[in-house]
Each structure stands twice: as structure tokens, then as C-alpha cells.
Amino acid sequence: MTLRAYAGPVDDEQIERVRQAALAADGDVWLPGPGGDLPAEACVVAQDAGEIVGFGRLDRWTEDDGTEMFLVTGFVHPAHRERGHGTAMLRRQEAYAASLGSGAAHQQLGGNADGSRPGSRQLLLDHGYRVAFTVVDLSRPVAAAVPGALPPGLRIRPVLAAHQPRIHAVIVECFTDSGHGFMPTDLDTHLAGVRDTDLWAVAWDGDEIAGLVISEREGDGVADSPWVAVRPAYRRLGLASALLAHSLAAMREHGVSVATIRTVAENPHRTVQLYERAGYQVVRRMPRYRKPLAAASS
């Protein structure tokens, strides 16, 4: 067994073959692939008798609270598991992350493994990773959706281009310091991603935004709601539930059949329960594991 850096497109066909075999064994999970602007050293290939049997990559970003994250992901062909390939790739990527570390106070290694990947979960646990938070995916049909009553004094207004700076500011205000991996974007990035505003529900109190639900079409009759935000002064009034109902009703009117939403189980606002009351059902739980970068050698 040997490890080496990704050699470029010449490796892609074999990597994809291994990736598809891993997906067939593990089910509908996210697995990394080559791509992006990563240096070759950030992607590692495991070989057995000259044949590619595993692939891993290291992604790096800084979260809103200043945490510098190094996410280690990878997979091994099912026929070559339990031979040390995963451990070797993990250790190599941890060492590479340590070589990149800036020495900042908050540097974390991260790894993902849901219930369908017990081997990956155990690998992370054996190397000192612990669950930091759990991402939860939920879904519901929209056929029976009807608008809900807003709290007194608030009203839904059509979304205009002039509203976007305020909408962006509300998202940043509500999610900054969440501690669950939020990465703020600047206004230009937000504007570049604006679409499907006919599905949005934005509640106003006079000239101030009180809360919002942003939804986007994903194709095949599915729409996702990546942002649900209620400003602190308007919480505990039922506004989030009312906005969800308005957004779901808009989806129904525009031919959407299934609504999806993602949250964090540890959210202090008990968002999983909020969405379940709105008719959503949990379809997947995805623990996010972390450990301090300084512990990479442990």
C-alpha cells in the first residue's frame, strides 16, 4: 500500500470508479472528488499494487467566529477496507493540515460520517474526533400547505431588488456567532446567488424586516429553504411558523411538490421541533466531528 498526491485528470477515471463503488456500499452519502483550486498535496490517493483504492482531500476555510477549519474527507473501495488505507490517508491529511496551520487560537480538524458509514465514524473516534454538532435534513410534501397568520402589525411584502441589502444584513445578524459552521458572505456574493424570489416570505414591521424564509427551486419538483431567520425582537411570537407556512403555500402555487430544509440539532431555538410542527419529517442526521488541530499527532 502506498500514498501519493493526486496526479491530476489522469487519476480521475480510477477515482470515480472507486467513488461509485463506495456509494453503492454506503448509500446516498456525500463523498469528495477532485476539483476546485486545491493544490495537488491537498488531495491524497491510496494505491494497492499500483491500483487506486482510496481518495481523500483536505478543504480549508474560516468561520464567522474566527475558527480556522481543516475538513478531512475521503473514501476507500469496499473490497480494500480494513487494511489501513483510511487510517493512512487520515494521518497524512492531518499532517498536511498541521503544516498549513497559522498558529491561530482556534484551529480545528473536521470530519463527517453519518450512520451509514460506521467504519468512518469509528476511524474518527479512534483518532480523537468528537461530535461538535449534528446537521439534520428534513422534508415534507407541500400539497396541503396554506398561509399562516402573521403576528399583529407585520405583513408580507413582495421581494424587490432594493430589499436585498436589508435581507442580507438580517441573515448575517441572525446567524453570526451560531457556532455551527456559518460562513458569512459579502453583499455582492449574496446578490449573485439571488433567485426564485417568488418563493420567498419576508415579513416587515413598517420599514424593518422582522423575519424571512428564503427558498429556492432544486429541480424535479423540489424546493429547499436554506435560510430561515427571525430577528431577536420578533422571536417567540410564532413568526417563524407563519413564514414557513407562507413559503410552503407559495411553493404549492408555483408547482413545487416537495420542500426540504436543513438545520442543526443543537440549535438553541429548537429548530428541528419547529420544522416538525410545520409538517417536515427528519430524513437524515449527519454528525460533524471535530478536534483541535494541535491534537493532530495524538
Image (spheres, rainbow, N blue to C red):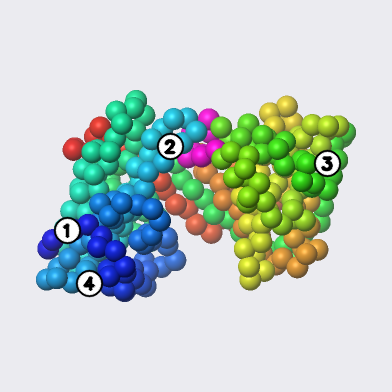
> In the figure, residue 13 lies in which quadrant?
bottom left
Total number of numbered labels? 4
Most common secondary structure along the magenta stretch: loop
In percent of the image, x 63 and y 68: which residue is there?
219
Give the number of the disc on residue 79.
4
Tell me the amino acid under the disc marked 3.
Answer: Leu
Within-10-Å neighbours for mark 1: few <14, some 14–19, many 20+: some
Task: Measuring from the top left, give residue 29's x and y in whole percent.
Answer: 42, 62
Which tag, 1 or 3, sits closer to the chain's start? 1
| Comparing labels 3 and 2, the label whose residue is closer to the camera | 2
Whether residue 39 sits left or right of residue 259 in the image: it is left
Tell me the amino acid under the disc marked 4.
Answer: Ala
Within-10-Å neighbours for mark 2: few <14, some 14–19, many 20+: some
Task: Measuring from the top left, give residue 250's x and y in whole percent.
Answer: 78, 57
Image position of 75 with respect to 194: above or below: below
Whether residue 205 sits left or right of residue 212 in the image: it is right
Within-10-Å neighbours for mark 3: few <14, some 14–19, many 20+: some
Within-10-Å neighbours for mark 4: few <14, some 14–19, many 20+: few
Task: Measuring from the top left, give residue 284's x and y in whole percent.
Answer: 50, 57
Give the number of the disc on residue 150.
3
Q: Is residue 293 magenta?
A: no
Image: magenta residue range: 177-184
Image position of 35 with respect to 270: above or below: below
What residue is pinned by disc 1? 3
In percent of the image, x 53 and y 59: which residue is there?
283
Give the number of the disc on residue 62.
2
Q: Are marks 3 and 4 in contact (CB under 8 Å)?
A: no
- Secondary structure beneath label 4: helix
Q: CA distance from mark 3 to mark 2?
A: 37 Å
Q: CA distance from mark 2 to mark 4?
A: 36 Å
| Comparing labels 4 and 1, the label whose residue is closer to the camera | 1
